[in-house]
Amino acid sequence: MKKDTSPPSALTDLVERYQLVQGEPCSACGCQLYRTNMYQWPQPVCVRCFPGRGYHEWSDQVDALFPKQRT
Ligand SMILES: [Zn+2]
């Protein structure tokens, strides 16, 4: 099994499966995936800063695509 590179399809897969949008890198964590289905917020929020229900199940995939920033 090769796990050296993340194919672009991994990102697309997440976007489609969890109904996300890709946007500018989050200023806090660098993640480019945003939720569009959170009614509590006036604008899309980063999936990592505002994890939704069940996010822990696929957070590893997000971390792999967008390594956490170290401050
Ligand atoms: Zn974030």
Image (cartoon, helix red, strand yellow):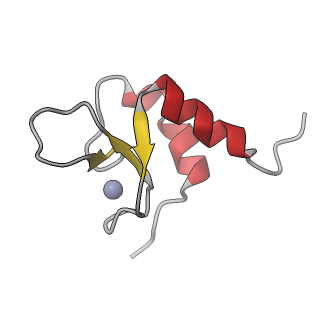
Q: Residue at x 70, y 46 (%)?
A: 8
In this view of the protein, which residue sits in the foreground, 1 or 39?
39
- Asked if residue 47 can be seen in this view, the reply is no
Find residue 14 and report its image quarter: top right
The vertical placement of 30 against 15, above or below, is below
Q: Residue at x 60, y 41 (%)?
A: 11
Q: Residue at x 60, y 31 (%)?
A: 13
Question: Which corner quadrant of the figure contains ligand 1?
Answer: bottom left
Left or right of 64 in this view: 43: left
The vertical placement of 44 against 69, above or below, is above
Tell me where residue 21 appears, x and y as whole percent: 41, 43
Left or right of 49 in this view: 21: right
The vertical placement of 19 against 33, above or below, is above
Q: Which quarter of the image is occupied by the C terminus?
A: bottom left
- Asked if residue 34 can be seen in this view, the reply is yes
Number of labels in the image equals 0
In this view of the protein, which residue sits in the foreground, 35 or 63?
35
